[in-house]
Image (cartoon, coloured by chain):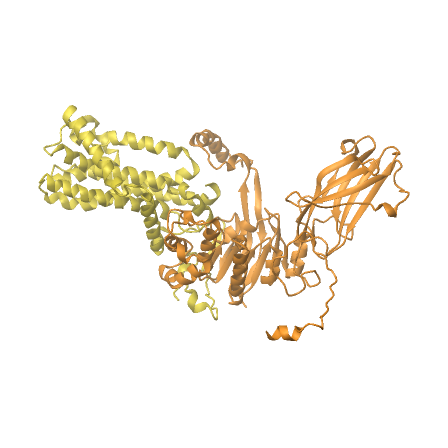
Chain colours: A orange, B yellow
Amino acid sequence: MTAILKTFDLGKEYLLGGSTDPYETLRESLKKLPKAVASHLLGRKTQRNTFWALKNVDVSVETGEVVGVIGRNGAGKSTLLKLLTRVTEPTTGGFDLYGRVGSLLEVTAGFHPELTGRENIYLNGTILGMKRAEIRRHFDEIVEFAGIERHLETPVKRYSSGMYSRLAFSVAAHLEAEILLVDEVLAVGDAAFQQKCVGKMGDVARSGRTVLLVSHNMNVINKLCNRVLVLREGEVVHDGSVQSGIDTYLCHESENVESTWELAEAPGDDLVRLTRACVTDVGGAPCGAFDIQEGIQLELEFTVHATPDYPLAPNFRVFEPTGGCVFMTFDHPNHHERPVYHRAGNYRAVCHIPGNLLAEGTYYVTACVSTRERRIPHVFVENAFSFRVHDTMQPGSARGSVYTGPFPGSFRPVLDWEHQVDQTTETSPTCLTHS
Amino acid sequence: MSLSQDSNSATAAFTVDARDTRGSIAMPHHPVVSVRAGRRNWVDASQLWEFRELLWFLMVRDVKVRYKQAALGVIWVVLQPLTMMAVFSVIFSRLANIPTEGVPAPLYLFAGLLPWVYFASGVANASNSLIGSTSLVSKVYFPRLLLPSAAVGAALVDLAISATLFAGLMMIYRQPLSPQIVLLLPLTLLLVILVLAIGTGMAALNVKYRDVRYVIPFILQLGMFITPVIYPLSFAPEKWRPLFYLNPMTGIVAGIRSAVYGLELPVEAMLASTVLTTLLLFGAVTLFRRMERTFADVI
């Protein structure tokens, strides 16, 4: 097999601060001119504040591979795709492509709101690099896939946003390209259309075309890709198997895994001060993202200055992004009739959340230390840390190994079920399968 | 499958037909696209031909969009030169007594206004074409030169409509045609090239310096009075004449009017216009291609 896409030391540097000011005025430029000329003549390099969006990327992709590109926001995923589509130029290195590139990035970019659906199909198709004949050949498929038959002659500005992005995706998806670049477009439309898109992507992948797929959706990555690149701060930190790639990504992706304070500035009152709050994996290592089946540990470290009248209760409140409280938890009273750690000193409390309990999503944790009987909150830190739960579709979760559709709810416990057939009625399982 | 030998050829991408590579993918021996840092990776002007379909669709878009949801639609195209003609014939020929070289004043003015209105709308549209398509420029790869070119091309439709109106006016006034009218074609071509040159240059500068947006209307307003649009070139004092030749529109406007009405051709001015337009075109394209590589990052 030969490579269809090859990058050599590919890098992109962006200017930060003053000189990147995109709308530089002529006057500013003229003002800077003498200085620039002088430093140029003297051979002095002007100090510039730069940042590398992408660094030393050496990747070779073979025909037919479906490569997932994952990483946090700002890790360089979009920059990589932007370079490959030649929208922007590399600062270092370069790349070779041995086939036509189609991109499902920013599919609506070529649309003009005043033009009708039909006109936009032709315009956008041509902008994406299709020949008129090619568009004509696929016209009916495009319209049907987008499901806009009745609105072909309507200006797209009157489309619902779902119709708009469906049409855009549909045009781009019908481009005959050997290399397809896809970025997060699977997020367009409603659940049914997303499902359709994933299906279409699967068809593309199976048709032997090469796909680079950028997504935050681990389900899709896991389902479609046979190789994963993980980017972190512009560099490739993993290139290989899907599962280990997802693991690498998940363990470093969370924004705010840990909060620590110097005792002098620590939140709290005269009695208790919080010095550290964090989320860790079962091994105790700080980690912000978990597979749905993994256990999660919430940790608190606090300092008690005096002996309180009533026992102290460290507790956590776990919130959803929408602000709803998923649950609150504190040290179970029956376990400690006589709590041990409520004299002056430094303490650490750990709460264990079992795997297969929280559904996928992001959770924000409020860390508290209160006095149990009097309910005085001594420490109350909102959003002390956050973590994410992902469903990577591994067998063993409540999802089982067959169902891949939407799974609502904040909790996803694996529960026991019991089945009985009521022998007194006519309907038996065998009858059901026949009907 | 014919692949360009030039490994840097970007347009070669479009000569690969995916249909015959779908089942069993035949690998081209040369990369279809090869990009290196610091190298000129953008499309050559000569390769623009490959993108003629896109140019066409962009032009069609510009034309269609312009008068969508305007009750009067295309009437606006002729309304502007017609009103200008009416107002100027009253003010300048009747009140100010500016000579019109024996041609009825409305006709004389219209012949000057026609190229000027095209120049003004072409330059204005082209210079805003890049910053008006921010999402395209920052998200899709295609030769950016197409955007100002399409704007200039779309303005040609307006010119054609007004020219038809003009022909009608000529007939109403029973104005005889002179054999010099054959010069109309090369002069119009020169006009289009000039608009293209100034338009692309301004479009490129506009991406980096938004000052251009404010400068253009100002220059266009002023330009109409330093160009012999509403007065004959002979109206300018002899010793200031060479200064007028520095304005590339002088030769074109005066030339077109002389060609239509069989007046004495302003040969010096026309030559000056040709030279200046050529220089401007090369300058503008060079500038555009130098700035093009950073458009997506700066816009």
- As drawn, the residue found furthest toward the right would be A338
Q: Is residue A119 visible?
A: yes
Q: Percent position (x, y) of residue A31?
A: 46, 29
Using the image, determine if residue A340 lies above or below residue A282: above
Q: Nearer the viewer, residue B208 or B147?
A: B147
Q: Nearer the viewer, residue B6 or A267?
A: A267
As drawn, is B260 to the left or to the right of A130? left
- As drawn, the residue found furthest toward the top would be B95
Using the image, determine if residue B99 lies above or below residue A159: above
Quarter placement of the C terminus of chain A? bottom right
Q: How many marks?
A: 0
Q: Percent position (x, y) of residue B131?
A: 41, 41
Q: Residue drawn at (31%, 39%), measured in percent from left and top?
A: B123
Q: Is residue B33 visible?
A: no
Q: Percent position (x, y) of residue A6?
A: 53, 59
Quarter placement of the N terminus of chain A? bottom right
Instruction: Choose top left, top right, bottom left or bottom right for residue A318.
Output: top right
Instruction: Choose top left, top right, bottom left or bottom right for residue A324.
Output: top right
Q: Percent position (x, y) of residue B84?
A: 22, 33
Q: Nearer the viewer, residue B130 or A294?
A: A294
As drawn, is B175 to the left or to the right of A397? left
